[in-house]
Structure formats: structure tokens, C-alpha cells
Amino acid sequence: MKRSNLHRFSLRVHISFTIAIVALLVVALICLLANILLERQFERYAEGQRELRASDIAQNLSMLYYPVTKTWDVDAIHALGMYSMTDGYILLVRDANGEVVWNAQNHDMARCSAIMDEIAERMGRYGANGRFTARDLPLKQDERVVGEAMISSYGPFFFSEADAALLSALNRILVIVGLIALAAAAIVGFLSARRIARPALAAARATERIAGGDFAARANADSGVRELDELARAVNRLAKDLGEQHELRKRLTADIAHELRTPLAAVSVQIESMAEGVTEPTHERLAGCRDEILRLTNLVDGLKRLEEASANGDARQSREDTDIAALVRSVCAAWESEAAAKDIAIETGSVGENPFVVKVDGDAVAGALSNLLSNAVKYTSSGGRVTVKIVPRDLPKTVSIVVADTGPGIPESELPRIFERLYRADKSRNRGTGGAGLGLAIAREAIRANGGEITAENAKNGGAVFTIIL
């Protein structure tokens, strides 16, 4: 069968065909081996029976000599000889002096020839290569030799008609058993193939629906076959992730449009009003237009930085041994004045002077930490505090930077999404309650580019806790 034609068949047909071929080969091999072993065993049995039968004939012949009269019972010998002839044994009996007492060929040469030809033909059909051979067996009474029997038979073994019929029946039984086993294997193979193909086909159809935009499509992950269940779960994860990415892109487009619309509308109204002479182009109005343009510029710069951080990936080339303790003290010192203006204390006492050297891009980590401190100072009320500490981890050369504040914390429903691009808990995107929603996304990408991770949670006593793991 050509490969191109084979590809047109379903998985069920492929599996059924494969199982049937394997079963056929196995059954054929078993039947062949069983036949060979059976025939060999039967041949050994027939050879043993030939030897045993010849010994029995010799023993029976020795009992037909009468030592008192020193004569042979020729009639009994004749009866035994004719009976043995029908079994394929041709007898010739001599006395102790070597004189012929009885010879089967002299009594019925035609029958001897017919029997010998029939046995030779039977064994020829079986495929045995042999010929008639004669054996001389002594005839003894009380350990005294009274004569000699020459027994001719087909060797090294031969089958009687009953033996041949039995062997033929056994071979037929093997063939029938093989056919039954093959049929059973085909049925089991078909059922197994259907059981395997059904969830695989369902996963394929779910994937087609996902490719068509139906991200709610799911594959059945309860087939009972581990690999198929893993495939279904992978398809379901793919559908879930693609659905979330689709929703994220929609929100991202809407958020970017909102972020751009507000400053553009403000600038457009101001310029149109001044162009039509409705308002004077005063310094304050021009400064307002400049501020809105700067806001747009900052938004574009933030998006650019975010994409650069995402594109950097595993930025190994820019990593170098960095003292995290010194980096934390430096960033915290840069925010002390702004925190002091709001009467907020930045505590770094736990950082200490001991160095924590980690191979990272120091500028990227400092930028991420600065962003966390900016948010902490922004959302912490006057009189509050921001705590920054370094926590060594179990793994060697691994540390965490923990930034905790006493602000209002983060709503639990928002925690899983605060690192998304342009995401803000304030759906109105009021500038008075935050920026464009890029800072945390940029911070996460920067930390990930250095092989780390950043997480967020709420403290038990209130306030947000951000952890940078390096």
C-alpha cells in the first residue's frame, strides 16, 4: 500500500490495521512453532514406538520356541508375522543354527510389497526422508539364544494410519485456534482503536474550533488513557490561554485607545479653540498642550520599554555580579526625599551591610525596584511606612527583595491581573489614581529577563507586599 494512500485512513483504521498485522504475525509464529515442536515430539514418540514394537515382537517370537522338542510353533509365528505386517513390520525368523524358520516375503511377497509401498507413500506425503531398514534382534529364553529375528521397518520412524490421522487433526486444531485468536485480536483491536481514536478525534475537533476563534471549546480529558488525557488537558490549556490572550488584546486595545484619546482630545480642543480665535494662545494654554503631549510621549516610551524588556528574554550577556544589598540601599536613598515629603518612612534596617552577590543586570533590577517603591510611596498614606528587606532563600546564591507598605492593599480579585499590560484596578483610568498601568508590567518583564520572578500579595495586617525573587 502506498504511503500517500495510507495517510488517507483514519487513526482508528491505522490502529486496527496495525493490531491485526501484529496479531497475525504473532498467531502465525505461535502456530508455526507449535507445529514444529508438536511434529518433533511426535516424531520422537513414533521412533520410540518403533523400537518398542520391535522389542515386543522379538520377545513374543522367542516364546514360540519349545526347547524340549527343539521345535518352533510355525503357525503362531505365521499369525504374528502377518499381524505385524499390517503394522508395517516385515519379519524373518531364523533358528540358532541360522536356518530360516519363517519369512514373510516367502509367504506373501505381494502383500509385503504393497504395505511397504503404502508406508513409503504415506511418509512421502508427510515429507519424511527415510527407507526400509532391517534390524537383527536375538531371540532368548533364560538368557540363552534360541534364534534370531530380522525385523524390517520404515526408518528412522514412521506413522501408522491412525498416527497420521491424529497428527493431521492436531494441525487442523492449531489452524482453527489461530484463526479464532486472529479474529478475537481483530475485534479487540477494533474496539481498542475506537476507544483511542474517539478522544483523539474529539481533541482534534476542539482544536479546529479553537483555531476558528471558539476559545470556549474543550476536549474530554477523562478517556482513561494517560497520554490522551494529557493531550486533552494540553488542548484545554491552550484554549484557556488563547482565550485569556484574546481578552487581554481586546482590553489592551481599548486601554490604549482610552489613554490616547484623552490627551489627544484635550490638545485638539485647545488648538482648535486657539486657531479659531475663541481663546488666546496664552502661556498657560500652551503649557497645558505641552503637558498632554508629554503624557503621550511617556505612554509611547513606556510601551517601547515594555516591548524591549519582553524581547530581551534571558538577557545573560548583560548580567554581572551585583551586590543586591548595595543596590537596594541606593534605590531606597533615591526615594527618601519624595517619601519624606509625604511623611512616609522608608525602612531598610534589615538590609544591613552584608553583601548579597547575584549575577543579574543591575540596572534592570534597580528599575523594577524603583517602580515598586514609586507605587508604595504613591499609595501609602501620610504617616505610613515602606519596608524593604532582603531575604536569603534556600537555593545557593538566591535572594528575594521584599517591598511592603502600609497602604490600602490590592483587591483580591485584582491580584492575578495587576502585572498585565495597561491594566488598572480603576476602570475609569483616572490620572489622579495612577499612571497608564505599564510600570508593573515593565518591572515583571525586566525581572524575568534576569531569570527571576516577581509576585504580589496582601499582608495580613494590611498593605501590599511585592517580592522580587532573584
Image: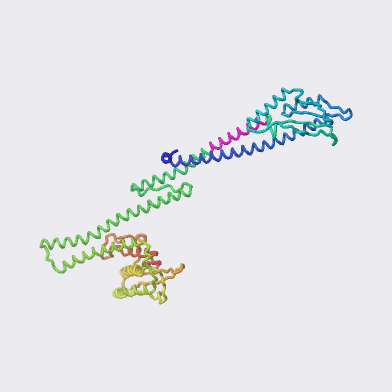
Q: Split into 4 quadrants, where in the image is the N terminus? A: top left
Q: What stretch is highlighted in magenta?
A: 163-184
Q: Which residue is drawn at 43% across and 45% down?
A: 200
Visual colour scheme:
rainbow
Q: Which residue lies furthest to the right in this view?
A: 68
Q: Position of residue 420 (x, y in %)?
A: 33, 60
Q: Which residue lies furthest to the left in this view?
A: 277
For the residue pair 362 and 317, the one nearer the viewer reads as 317
Q: Where is residue 469 in the image (x, y as percent from the top left)?
A: 40, 66
| 377 relative to 130, above or below | below
Residue 315's image quarter? bottom left
For the residue pair 187 and 130, the one nearer the viewer reads as 130
Q: Position of residue 115 (x, y in %)?
A: 70, 26
| 15 relative to 238, above or below | above
Q: On the picture, is 184 further left or further right than 234? A: right
Q: On the picture, is 424 further left or further right than 16? A: left
Residue 4 lies within the magenta run: no
Give the main secondary structure of the magenta stretch.
helix
Q: Where is residue 338 in the image (x, y as percent from the top left)?
A: 29, 73
